Image: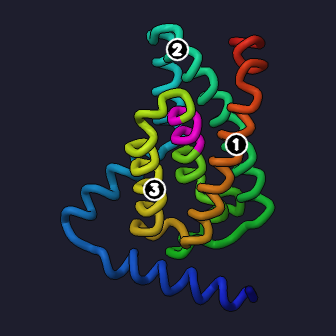
Amino acid sequence: IFAGDIQNFDDSVYEAIHDGWHSNACDIYFNSASFCGEPEFYLSVNLAFICFGDDDLKDSGKLAFTGLAATMLTAQILKCAIGRERPESTDLPRCKSSMPSGHTTSAFTMAYIYSAQYPKLRIPLYIAAISVGLSRIYLGEHYPTDVIAGAALGTIGGIVVMKNKHFILEVGF
């Protein structure tokens, strides 16, 4: 695949979602999904689980908190290194750039870890994560490949955390 083909894909999918899906219902849904994709929202949820949950929920919160810290640091480094402009460019600083989507990274990190801990929640967790990713395109913040990269980064981060689950829980915090 050539760079032009990727950009053509990004442009056509971006236009279909950003320009083609607009409605009052979608505005409400995707604004809510984007809010729920905020890393600060997830960090707050995990801290609440760590402080107030039962032992299983505390462990899940610790794992997810660890995963979020690692993937968000990685996403931030990539944003600074890549420096891709956002589709609706607002002259943001390089480290606020488009690639990868931090919201999507967070959502997929959470979806992977919590679905590994609570398999019965897998489908709603991934519907939520996909909704966050789509919201970033719908709202004009990211291209589709930014969202795909965020989903991949979040999933890889979740895999790494769950492969090291026992070590992370032994170290504790």
Image coordinates of residue 154 in percent, x first then y, are 63, 48
| Residue beneath disc 3 | 130
Res. 63 image quadrant:
top right
Q: Amino acid at mark 1?
A: Gly
Quarter assignment of residue 165: top right
Give neighbour class at mark 3: few <14, some 14-19, many 20+ (Cα, 10 Å).
Answer: some
Residue 148, placed above or below residue 117:
below
Q: Which comes before the other along the chain, label 3 or label 1?
A: 3
Q: Quadrant of the N terminus?
A: bottom right
Residue highlighted by disc 2 = 56
* Residue located 46% across and 27% down the image: 45
| Residue at horizontal 32 percent and vertical 50 percent from the top | 32
Looking at the rendering, the stretch of residues picked out in magenta corresponds to: 109-115
Task: Name the amino acid type tagged 2.
Answer: Asp
The picture places residue 94, in percent across and down from the top left corner, at 71, 63
- Which of the two marks, 2 or 1, is nearer to us in this view? 2
- Label 3 to label 1, Cα distance in Å? 17 Å
Vertical order, 127 against 21 (above or below):
above
Q: Position of residue 155 (x, y in %)?
A: 64, 48
Residue in the picture at 51% in, 25% down: 46
Q: Secondary structure at mark 3?
A: helix
Picture coordinates of residue 42, whole percent (x, y): 50, 34
Looking at the rendered structure, the secondary structure element under dot 1 is: helix
Q: Is residue 135 left or right of residue 164?
A: left
Magenta residue check for 84 = no
Residue type, label 3: Ile
Q: Which residue is mark 1?
A: 157
- Up/down of 65 relative to 169, above or below: below
Secondary structure mainly formed by the magenta segment? helix
- Mark 2 Cα-neighbour bin, 10 Å: few <14, some 14–19, many ≥20: few
User: Taking 71 as reference, is 119 left or right?
Assistant: left
Q: Camera-side residue: 97 or 124?
A: 124
